[in-house]
Image (cartoon, coloured by chain):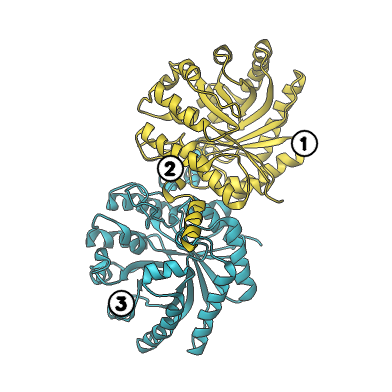
Chain colours: A yellow, B cyan
Amino acid sequence: MALPKKITIHELGPREGMQIEKNPVSTADKIRLIDRLSECNFHEIEVTSFVSPKWVPQMADAEEVVAGFKKNPATRYTAIYLNSQGLARAVKTGRLDVEGSLSVTASEMFSKKNTNRTIEETLIEAERRIDSLKTMNVTAKEVSVMAAFGCNYEGNIDPKHVVNLIARLIGIGQDYGISVELIQLADTMGWGNPLSIRRLVGMVQDRWPDKRINLHLHDTRGMGLMNAFAAMEMGVDDFDSAVAGLGGCPYAGFKDAPGNIATEDLVHMCNEIGVETGVDLDKLVDVAREAEMIVGHPLPGKVMRGGVLQTYRNNAASVGQ
Amino acid sequence: MALPKKITIHELGPREGMQIEKNPVSTADKIRLIDRLSECNFHEIEVTSFVSPKWVPQMADAEEVVAGFKKNPATRYTAIYLNSQGLARAVKTGRLDVEGSLSVTASEMFSKKNTNRTIEETLIEAERRIDSLKTMNVTAKEVSVMAAFGCNYEGNIDPKHVVNLIARLIGIGQDYGISVELIQLADTMGWGNPLSIRRLVGMVQDRWPDKRINLHLHDTRGMGLMNAFAAMEMGVDDFDSAVAGLGGCPYAGFKDAPGNIATEDLVHMCNEIGVETGVDLDKLVDVAREAEMIVGHPLPGKVMRGGVLQTYRNNAASVGQ
């Protein structure tokens, strides 16, 4: 299949990035990061996470962050939440595009470790989730399967199992009058490779040819960006990523931390292969460098060090004149 | 085309890595790195560079390094050299598989900056190179084109220009009775992407279907490993790489330093997609970690931080029993 003409990028840096940082990042720095990202013209920026400060103290200032950033009218600002309390907090800010999503983890062991629920319990919980969404007048168009390509605790994940879980989530949605438009496949722990991406994406496309697929990729073992390319060649045009590769912290002692694919590397690759993103790459590379300063340690993004090829082309052309 | 059953990997870490390091690496550490790599069962390890210590002081101990390492009988030990003096030094050690190669840079500007010769002067020099090779009884089976996918100084490189240069080199070889078996395409400054890899590899394969192609890839902008995958899907089965991504040093102030693709990430990818390498990945990951300690700063390899997937699978299986 030909590459898509254009892809949509969901920038997760302010949320995924700040969540994992060991050293506290000030509220002002979080707001500055969002404001700088807003200048790059993203379709969406996920700005924070409404979780209990008991579990994630780094996110205790979620309300302040949301109150503080400037909006770009071209960008949607979202947040994540794990339960109805978090949902209520997100809605209450009045400044976010709050969305619902029905999600499940494909790995039983990771589900229990991460959420203290089995997969079946999570699916039952999804029905309660829909109730809260309806109560709060929040729409839901997305289902999501985490650890869809493998799990550090459970090993390989059978793609047929993933397809069955998607079918269950879509079915639960239908029961409650929710029409799912987007299927997210999350490679939460960086297990995917181009062959497994093609296999699962192909199975999902065969089963639901009318639905859009989003890929949430981590670059834990260096295959994140090639997985995005492999998916694009299957027609996938919707991706999550985080500026500078925030969301993991491989150079500061976080063992096995699974960083998101770096947004500027994704945009740069798209520019090189002729796929539009709508994102201003030069500004974004500056933000990536600033993100390193904000967290105070190197981040894995490559283009911010290697340089944008188009800049070299422009310089070469001006020398040649 | 299907992926190759097996690829050959040329480990360049001891040469490319040590050459670029700012802080001096001791001769003992260089030898230790080679000895540890020898335990991983490489087809070839490039151990040093015979260049003038005036230009590259880090390589002044080339003879001592070559005298000091232990040989694995399964591995070929090679070195690079830039002129007949260097060639003579390499041969004189009596411990190396000295090989000849006819090489040229596809970028006129880079050729002048890097070697103070035009492309045409380099081609004339190639004839003198053959004379020295014959005098020293060294065989040559390889031609190589550097900056084959683009150049920081000159911008894009036309693949037709690269094919013409290969034809010239092969022709010069033929004039002197040299039968070229391997064509190396070097992405010296990290300009390639999967589409440009497919285009140039395809053109070379069409023109010389009987010759093997080697790719020398740098991961300057995060596309190195995906370029290797794209080439494998074209049937390419011969790759250069450097343990831990040595050969560039993006985290220590070397602006634009183009690191080689990390060998352990390449081997890990191959293991995941069912392509044999013959390399012991677990041992290699340990060597990658040791390489970081030797150079004294983080290196870009991912798997040494993210962990080998097969190890997680094995652990998951043993928990499941």
Position of residue B187 measured from the top left corner of the image (x, y, whole percent):
48, 62
Position of residue B280 measured from the top left corner of the image (x, y, whole percent):
43, 57
Residue at figure coordinates x 59%, y 57% from the top left:
B230
Is A127 on the left or on the right of B26, as rendered? right
Task: Inspect the image, locate mark 3, and give the three-letter code of the amino acid beneath it.
Answer: Gly
Give how far apart the Cα atoms at labels 2 and 1 are.
36 Å
Q: Which of B293 and B247 lies nearest the eye of the viewer?
A: B247
Q: Quadrant of residue A104?
A: top right
Which residue carries the number 2 mark?
Answer: A300
Q: Residue furthest front?
A: A321
Is disc 2 in the same subunit as disc 1? Answer: yes
Helix, strand or loop under label 3: helix
Which residue carries the number 3 mark?
Answer: B86
Helix, strand or loop under label 2: loop
Say which chain tag 3 marks: B
Task: Inspect the image, locate mark 1, and give the three-letter code of the amino acid beneath it.
Answer: Asp
Which residue carries the number 1 mark?
Answer: A210
> Relative to residue B213, is residue A221 depicted above or below?
above
Residue at figure coordinates x 37%, y 56% from the top left:
B246
Give how far apart the Cα atoms at labels 3 and 2 are.
37 Å
Q: Quadrant of residue B245?
A: bottom left
